[in-house]
Amino acid sequence: MRRPLALAALLVVCAAAVLVYQSTRPQASGADARIFVPSPRFYLDLSPSFRTSIADAYWLQTIQYYGEHLRSDGRFDSLWPMLDLVTTLSPHFKQAYFTGAFALIDAARPDLSYGLLRRGFEANPADWHFPAYLGFFAYRFANNKDKDRIAARWYAKAAALPGRPAYIPRLAAALLTRSGARDKAIAMWSGVYAEGDKYSREKAVKALSRLLATDPQQRAKELASVQTMMSPEVFFQLLEDLGVGSV
Amino acid sequence: MSRVFTIALNTFKETIRDRILGVIVLFALAMIVGSVWLGAISLGQAGRMMQDFGLVAVTLFGLVVAVFVGASLVRKEIDKRTVFVLFSKPLGRSEFIVGKFLGLCATLFVVTMGMGVFLFLAVWYVGKSPAPDLLLACLLIYVQLVVVVAVTVLFSTVTSPTLASVLGVCVFIAGQLSSNVLSLTRLGHSPLVKAASWVVFVAVPNLSAVDIKAAVVGEQVSRPAALGLWVGYLAAYCVVVLLLASFVFKRKEF
């Protein structure tokens, strides 16, 4: 009778010791911002069949690393090597590019964000999100006077890709207008008019009215170049809306 | 043929009832369920994480079954002396080897595809759409494991089960690195190294050729025609290995 009781007591004491020690041990001190990240080449050569699984494992570690340092010291020394590893091992892992690009902004490296997104676009050329994000990053974080033109160029690329939302061509057209690329802006706004709904058409007419010459003859001549972008009915409707229907 | 089938059926019944097999499968299922938790901390990538880590679980646990059960398959019959009873009947040694191999392949099919279907349902259950290639990927993992079984059976006829298991795992790893060996044959300067690399490249089964795990998470497009040819190549490899195993086993003294 005593033996089972003694064993039960031993079990309770040991289990309590394990639980108490583990739950009261000091929390891990601030993790080092510089951690060892192997070269992507190493994994590509040594485990080609498991490369996406390794990329996923590093992705989980990257999220953890980012969250940990965002809350503590704000240092992200190893963020780029980790993102480089993940995206090299799994070039079609789109979320890694998008989240990584924004995380690198917190690391004060917009240049790397831009580079990461460019690499993502090279690997995923049919995805409009990449040029759209590139346009946003160029517009928001670039430090040169050409940023409107660069952003407009990216948005124009995004506008040409399938699946993009309706606001992308409008954004591209607005940025082309701002950057002074008049002919391209006219073409883009005409495209917005040809494809768009009532709201888009109103916006396009307003923008084209400002861009085109005020003389009706001249205006009609300038619009001749966009005639091929739309059906004759739509083109005549555009002329009508721009007040040159009679010309 | 019916003798081979009888041996295969008995091996299937024997291995499927093995408790170790149950434990391994339970571990694999636990790992697949565990990947749901991994998905929750992956910033909206639950489907990808579950499928990727799930397929790794199917591969690794399938490998454990293939290697450890495959290595003891022949030895167990010798140790329990049942082999004498079998060979007193009109049964060839090569029929015995092929029957044992086919029996374990059947067990492995049930285990691998069972885990694959479980993974498919688990992904679907958490509200993600499973990749169309998910079950094909499991089937191709099975094809790789069949080759490992054949090689392990060959090793088990010449060495101890432990060593046969280790060698089976080594062949699996080497099979994943086949393309690297090929690059060695191109890059090496020494003709001896080049020749040795070429021999290794030809001798080791190219298992990575039928690996489409990456395609499941959208990384590469699987090419059914080429895959069919590679599966044929691995089937021919198995035939060669089994013929070798039969040849060795025929000369074995008990």
Image (tube, coloured by chain):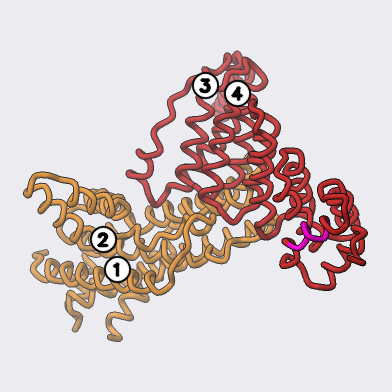
Chain colours: A red, B orange
Assign a secondary structure to mark 1. Answer: helix
Horizontal side of residue A226 vs B204, given as left or right: right
Residue at mark 2: chain = B
Q: Secondary structure at mark 2?
A: loop
Task: Residue B44 in the image: state x and y as whole percent.
Answer: 67, 45
Q: Is residue B44 visible?
A: no
Magenta-drawn segment: A219-224
Which residue: 51% across, 40% down? A57
Residue lying at 64% horizontally and 27% vertically, measured from the top left: A144
Mark-to-mark CA distance, 1 and 3 = 46 Å
Residue type at mark 2 is: Pro
Label 2 vs label 4, nearer the camera: 4
- Element under disc 4: loop
Q: Answer whether labels 2 and 1 touch (C-beta < 8 Å).
A: yes
Q: Are marks 1 and 4 in contact (CB under 8 Å)?
A: no
Task: Identify the residue under disc 1.
Answer: B234
Residues at marks 2 and 1, CA–CA distance in whole angstroms: 7 Å
Confirm whether the magenta stretch covers residue A221. yes
Q: Position of residue A97 (x, y in %)?
A: 58, 41
Q: Which residue is label 4 attached to?
A: A107
The chain containing the residue under callout 4 comes to A
